[in-house]
Amino acid sequence: MKRYSAQEDGAWVSEFISSRRTTRDFQPTPVPPELIDQILKDSLTAPSWSNTRPFKVAVATGEVRDRISNEFLSRWQALSAAMRGGIWSKIKLFIKRHGLPTSNRIILKPYVAELKPRAQRVGKELYGSLGVQRGDKAERDKQWGRNYEFFGAPVAMFVYIHKSLHIYAAADAGLMMENLMLSAHAHGLGTCAQGAVAFWDDAIREEFEVSKDYRLLCGIAVGYPSDAPVNSFQAHRIGLDELLLKPKLLGS
């Protein structure tokens, strides 16, 4: 087992981790299959609950990726048009049902008071960097719709977790995903974790054999980053003062 210098390699690791960015615009250049396999293998070195590895990954490329994207875009266009329209548009949406979420409706719930300001801040800063005004619903919906194009990424991954382990399966999947994204970063690839694709699990199941014991957690867009300015966007990070729990006073 290789030994690492605590000072030199430790500093490099910290710098490397902090250099990762979410990629929101990709080149169409295909990712070699062997490179996809490598980052997936690297993802499996993450720790896991009793080594159960309670997750599966669907990897969509080529025509499969395009079919899923087209289906997502069709549903999103129907949903966004209804939400921007009047009451009759919303009634038609519920009658036709094309565009309504078929899975993970919990994502639609508003954030609680403690977390909402963080989400509002990143939304304001990200859309502001793209020149999208807060009140411009059509342009905001258009930008959100890029999720369903996977921001141009040639590879779309979908992460499923085993229902039996509940939050512990999600925790394991999160560890696996972080390894995958850091490996991709090390190999010159960009990634974007996508909760937005979790609305329509049935569209993915049309293309992959997914056991009923697994539920969709999120997606990951993978590819080579473009030179678009949005890829330089850096979200605000909380400080240690917000991370750490305060100890109770002695004797209380």
Image (cartoon, rainbow, N blue to C red):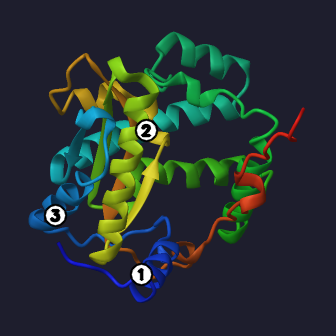
Helix, strand or loop at disc 1? Answer: loop
- Pointer 1 or 3: first along the chain: 1
User: Which quadrant does the C terminus fall into?
Assistant: top right
**Of the residues tagged 2 and 1, which is closer to the observer?**
1
> Of marks 3 and 2, which one's residue comes earlier in the chain?
3
Mark 1 vs mark 3: in front: 1
Which residue position is annotated with label 1?
6
* 219 sits to left or right of 40: right
Q: Amino acid at mark 3?
A: Gln
Q: Residue at x 20, y 77 (%)?
A: 2
Q: CA distance from mark 2 to mark 1?
A: 28 Å
Disc marking residue 38 = 3
Screen quadrant of the N terminus: bottom left
Q: State the image coordinates of residue 104 (x, y, percent, origin top left).
A: 48, 25
* Up-down relation of residue 70 to residue 160 (above or below): below
Camera-side residue of 37 and 86: 37
Mark 1 nearby-residue class (10 Å; few <14, some 14–19, many ≥20): few
Q: Could you say which disc has been placed on residue 171 in the image?
A: 2
Q: Residue furthest front?
A: 251
Q: Residue at the spot x=42%, y=34% of the render?
A: 170
Q: Secondary structure at mark 2?
A: helix
Query: Residue 145: x percent and y percent?
Result: 51, 48
